[in-house]
Amino acid sequence: MAQVSVKLPVGSVTAAGLGEVTVEAATVREALERAIAVEPAVRQRVYRADGSMFAGVFVGGRNIKLLGGLDLELTDGDALRIIPPISGG
């Protein structure tokens, strides 16, 4: 298991007011689930009701879609960022 930081989406904070959590996880999927365990409201910012990804997730500034998706293996010190889609008119 790697110790990684997960930067929560803009507008999401933990009960302690933190915008970032540190978790131990082997994959991106595990890191996201452990971050959601700390702050359950993050689930709706990451996943749609059908379980598909809603937000962009980046490790080291690179989109996980290009690196192996949710099963991407993590190493100590990796930093995940959750970026919700932006829309407007």
Image (spheres, rainbow, N blue to C red):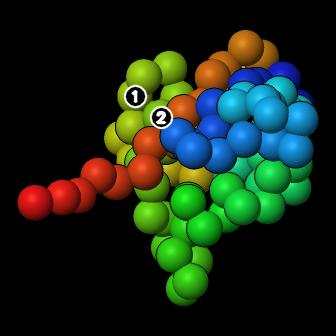
Q: CA distance from mark 1 to mark 2?
A: 5 Å
Residue 45 higher or lower than 69, as above or below: below
Residue identifier under label 1: 62
Discs 1, 2 touching: Cβ within 8 Å: yes
Amino acid found under the numbered disc labelled 1: Arg
- Label ID, residue 86: none
Q: Residues within 10 Å of mark 2 (few under 14, many from 20)?
A: many
Residue at screen point 29% across, 52% down: 86
Secondary structure under tag 1 reads strand
Work out whether residue 24 can be spotted.
Answer: yes
Give how far across and how far down residue 37 sits, in percent: 87, 55
The quadrant of the rendering that contains the C terminus is bottom left
Residue identifier under label 2: 58
Residue nearest the observer in this picture, 49 or 14: 14
Residue at screen point 63% across, 31% down: 7
Residue at screen point 56% across, 59% down: 46
Amino acid found under the numbered disc labelled 2: Phe
Residue nearest the observer in this picture, 30 or 47: 47
The quadrant of the rendering that contains the N terminus is top right
Is 71 left or right of 23, judged from the image as shown? left
Q: Which quadrant of the figure has residue 3?
A: top right
Give how far across and how far down residue 15 sits, in percent: 88, 44
Is 46 left or right of 24, judged from the image as shown? left
Q: Which quadrant of the figure has residue 67?
A: top left
Give how far across and how far down residue 76 sits, in percent: 77, 17
The residue lying furthest to the left in this view is 89
